[in-house]
Image (cartoon, rainbow, N blue to C red):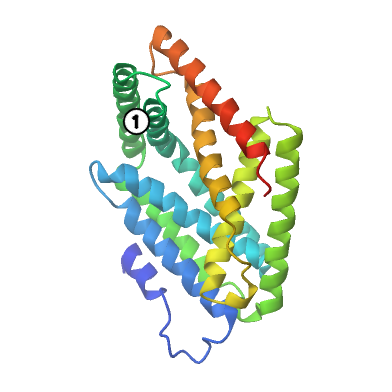
Amino acid sequence: MTGSAVLAAMSLEPAGSEHAHRPGDGLRAFGLDQLQSAARLLARRGQARHEGVHEARKCLRRVRALLALAAPRLGAHAAALDAELGRLCRGLSPLRDASALIEALQRLERSGAITADEAALAAASASVRREERLSAALARDPGLAARRCRLQRAAEKLAALDWPAVRRRDLRRGLARSEHRLRKAAARARRHPGNDAAWHRLRRRLRGWRQQNTLLEGIAPALVPEDSPVRDALATRLGESQDDVLLLARCRSDSPFAPALRRILRRAARLRLWALRAELVSLDA
């Protein structure tokens, strides 16, 4: 049986399952569906691979948010699986970062921070770097097949976790943990507005909390708090600021840009990042 077939066999249970009332069954089904989707996305070819990598990483982060929701109940095996998914996600980061760099350049152009000619020149250099990184990754792992095999094994491990033991109170406590960690991260970012790591931590905490809420809407909607437009805006702006941090990093070491262009991009990204963080400090997460 192929890896895709194994994942498909582990996918969503029928709606009439006698265990459908258990929240753990819904969590298990969701997690397996996301791993199946990630494997399919990594199998894309040509230019579609870039978007496939981006979407696959989203799937992996959703599964990690799911595991965090029920972590105390699921025990050490869930922690080990989470660590493995984290390694998979980080291994794909260089490929995703190369695409995020192009998106950051496009935002700078739209805002008028750099000219169309500067944006085109920078995007051309970033695109070359992106293709180089993808080619190198495919040379080491043709078709990203090894990564898809790891997803198959991850699905087997996820399916074997003690999902029947998960109760609604576990989900309630898990969401409360995420809320507490989010507020701590927000307070730290406000105290240290120049600390890139603090802002990155806040972005991860907010993303995980929102993913958990989205997941629970279909499993235990009574546990989900009301929508927060402020947090939606915060998530969007944090993503943009993280791309600016990435652009600044690529204007220093291992830069695809010529020195003169690097100086222009560094100044534009720094000004935009400062403005974004000043705005974010005023938002109440």
Pick the front one: 189 or 154: 189
Q: Quarter of the image containing the N terminus? A: bottom left
Query: At 33% across and 35% down in the image, what residue appears?
Result: 134
Pick the front one: 12 or 179: 179
Query: At 35% across and 42% down in the image, what residue appears?
Result: 141
Pick the front one: 46 or 88: 46
Q: Position of residue 205 (x, y in %)?
A: 64, 50
Query: At 63% across and 67% down in the image, what residue appears?
Result: 225
Task: Kindly identify which residue carries mark 1.
Answer: 130
SS label for mark 1: helix
Which quadrant of the figure has residue 50?
top left
- Is residue 170 visible in the rendered image? The answer is yes
Q: Amino acid at mark 1?
A: Arg
Outermost residue, top side = 260
Q: Position of residue 57 (x, y in %)?
A: 45, 50
Which quadrant of the figure has residue 74?
bottom right
Residue 276 to residue 17: above or below? above
Residue 258 to residue 64: above or below? above
Q: Position of residue 39 (x, y in %)?
A: 37, 57
How many neighbours does mark 1 have within 10 angstroms: few (below 14), some (14-19), or many (20 or more)?
A: many
Outermost residue, left side = 46
Pick the front one: 5 or 127: 127
Query: At 69% across and 51% down in the image, what residue appears?
Result: 182
- Is residue 251 visible in the rendered image? The answer is no
Q: How many marks?
A: 1
- On screen, residue 172 versus residue 97, left or right, reads right
